[in-house]
Amino acid sequence: MAWLVLLGAMLCMPRVGLGSLGSEGFLPSAPHNCPYRCVCAADLLSCAGLGLQDVPAALPAAAADLDLSHNALQRLRPGWLAPLSRLRALRLGHNELVVLGHGVFTNASGLRLLDLSSNALRALGRHDLEGLGALERLLLFNNRLAHLDEHAFHGLGALSRLYLGCNELSSFSFDHLHGLGTTHLRTLDLSSNRLGRIPVPDLAALPAFLKNGLYLHNNPLPCDCRLYHLLQRWHQRGLSAVSDFAREYMCLAFKVPTSRVRFFEHSRVFENCSAALAQGLEQPEVQLHVQMGRSLRLHCNTSAPAVRIAWVSPQHELLVAPGSRDGSITVLADGSLAISNVQPQHEGVFVCLAAGPRLHHNQTHEYNVSVHFPHPEPEAFNTGFTTLLGCAVGLVLVLLYLFAPPCPGCRRCYRRTCHCRRWPQAPSPLQELSAQSSVLSTPPDVPSRKASVHKHVVFLEPGRRGLNGRVQLAVAEDFDLYNPVGLRLKAGSESASSTGSEGLVMT
């Protein structure tokens, strides 16, 4: 039995050894044509962080995602991507590339992502990006770009995101966007550059969806009134590129680098800016008010026939035929947008995007839709009933006028009746004392007397029983309270002997 076990062990040993040498055994062989020290996994090839100064000579043809970032690459050979027919993403960030050159990407017709960030590129030539017709994302941020050829991006018709932030661009003409498929372009990052001149009319003429992705913060922008009003309008509309970085939008108040002020926090700098300067820069959006439950149809009117029409919903959904994902919005064959049952989620700005060979760039139209709840209809009144009610009210008013005396007459009659019914009573000492001193204004029924600010009439008339022989004080109408020198004392016939003994009484 021991001999059988030993024999089985000896027969198994050669198979294990052969497998370890790469024959058809238990361990897989290394991937075909994988560069030294790189990592290959299916269609992924990563040679990142290896300190490479040149691209590996042999690259596997199956690679669809090639990562050469974080190396020391200084140049790229023309036609080096010819073997990679399946390449979709190329990452060259964090290298030492200074120039690209003609023919570098001629064999990358299927490339969708190109990352050239964090290099030392100083300029983009006319043919540097030639052959990238399917490119969708181009990352050029954190370089030293100071010059862009006017046709550098020509032919990138599928480009949707262009990142040029953190460079040294002192000016940017939107003529650079000629040749770009602006129907697809959603993001244009120009932040953290040296932009001191911005063509405001070109900014206002951009499509609405590109304005939402145009980043201009951290630039020494001029404190221009038209630019201020344009950015203010974008900020009020809630465009994310402005509202998300509102504190980082600065301008030079006196053309001095140290005089930077924030656009949206130092309104005193722009207090003399007239809003009339900003009129006509942007086409005003059409205001539409629709009741909930009603139907709505929006037409995309263009100056020339459009080949392609699309819409952007308030939820930033791109609407093409047949319509929205939830089915509530329909895009018809003529390009118009139809909503059969308007609901609150349809409130907001609808943007029409029209593209065609005879249209300069793209034409956009904005519709600001406000949804209102239906108001209850008032009940209809019966005309005969209201006429009868009006006649009855009018008759009552006529009877009141004929048989009811006027109010002043009522008051006089009431006072006269009360006076007649008053029983004679002996006045109390307190009543006599309070009746003897009073300050009265000029009686209104005497037309010859006119009361002024400093003129008063004072009467002090003693009762004949309670206060024997007191002085009767009479102040003339022209008596001035601020100059009481002209005060005259008038002694009554019954109190002439007591004028010298009593003191002066003043009110």
Image (tube, helix red, strand yellow):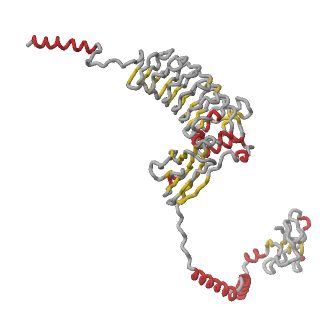
Q: Is residue 492 visible?
A: yes
**Image point 13% across, 11% down: which residue?**
7
Residue 243: tell me if it is visible. no
Instruction: Tell me the quadrant of the picture where the N terminus can be found.
Output: top left
Q: Quadrant of residue 45?
A: top left
Q: In the displayed structure, does residue 64 sit left or right of residue 310?
A: left
Q: Quadrant of residue 35?
A: top left
Q: Position of residue 504 (x, y in %)?
A: 86, 68
149 over 51 or under it: above or below: below
Camera-nearest residue between 134 and 67: 134
Give the total number of marks visible in the rendering.
0
Q: Position of residue 271 (x, y in %)?
A: 73, 43
| As drawn, 469 above or below 325 | below
| Residue at the far left in the pictured view | 1
Query: In the image as oriented, which residue stretches furthest toward the right?
Result: 486
Of residue 103 and residue 250, the one placed in the foreground of this image is 103
Q: As drawn, is 93 to the left or to the right of 265?
A: left
Residue closest to the eye, 409 or 71? 71
Residue 483, quarter of the rendered image: bottom right
Vertical position of residue 208 compared to residue 32: above or below: below
In the rendered image, which quarter contains the C terminus?
bottom right
Q: How far across and how far down the image is residue 310, in percent? A: 54, 46
x, y percentage for residue 5? 12, 13
- Identified at 65% across, 39% down, the residue is 203
